[in-house]
Amino acid sequence: METWNQREQARLMEIRQVRNELSIDAYGLVLKGQQIVILQPLWGRAIEVAHLRHQRVEEMKKRLKTGSWFPGMDTEVESQVERCNTCVAESKEQDTALPNTEGNPSASWSRVSLNLCRLPNEQLAAILIDNYSKFPVIETLWSTSFQDIGTALEKDFPLIGIPNELDFDNKPPLHGHALRDYLTSLGVVYCQIAVTVGHQKG
């Protein structure tokens, strides 16, 4: 693990490497080219703002670097994403590349995907992914029983609306009749696909 001294030395080296790009404008702002150099007390706030949409690492870095810079920015972004359960879950979901047999959905939350996974803190969770925006909704679970999964869906559906279609994998515990019967009762068309997100435990 990198120590505090090592991190500070890396930041100083990064500043040294760009020293010829640094300047001060008429308003007293320190610039690196066209980017505003953010002072250390504001690094956390900058990361927080860039993280609002739970974008993946590269998207967060690109957003920050559009108009700002500070030494160690890449490392701070990576650390933030690694600590965020939502970012980790969304990244895993995107990496599985869910198949879409009927083309892309035309509206948000019209077609969603349901998966179970273990979050970095080992908490079991149900993840609903909007296949249109790729935005995740995460509900922690006590168990993989349909009772707990159904409770999570009943909590989310009033917020996002009942989708037209829902994809889920055909593996325990999502392969039982209870989930299919529940979706049918709501008028949701379900599609069982072979997808695994994270490390499932029964």
Image (cartoon, grey):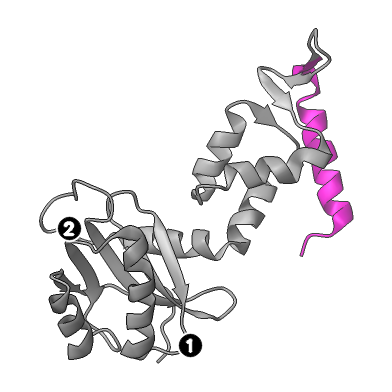
Q: Quadrant of residue 82?
A: bottom right
Amino acid bearing label 1: Trp
The spot of residue 154 in percent (x, y) is: 33, 75
- Identify the secondary structure beneath mark 2: loop
Q: In which quarter of the image is the N terminus?
A: bottom right
Residue 29 seen from this side:
yes
The disc label shown at residue 142, or none: 1
In contact (CB < 8 Å): disc 2 and disc 1 = no
Q: In the current view of this chain or complex, which residue is farthest to the right? A: 5
Q: In this view, does 134 lie above or below 21?
A: below
Residue at left 39%, top 69%? 127
> Between marks 2 and 1, how big is the CA–CA gap?
30 Å
Q: Which residue is drawn at 27% across and 56% down?
A: 109
Q: In this view, does 149 lie to the left or right of 48?
A: left
Question: What's the residue at 80%, 11% (across, down)?
Answer: 27
- Which residue in the structure is indicated by mark 2? 100
SS label for mark 1: loop
Magenta stretch, main secondary structure class: helix
Q: Where is residue 48 in the image (x, y as percent from the top left)?
A: 65, 47
- Residue 154 lies, with reference to residue 26, above or below; the image says below
**Residue 153 against residue 82 in the figure, above or below:** below
Q: Where is residue 18 in the image (x, y as percent from the top left)?
A: 76, 26
Q: In which quarter of the image is residue 121?
A: bottom right
Q: Give the range drawn in magenta.
A: 1-23
In front: 186, or 56?
Answer: 186
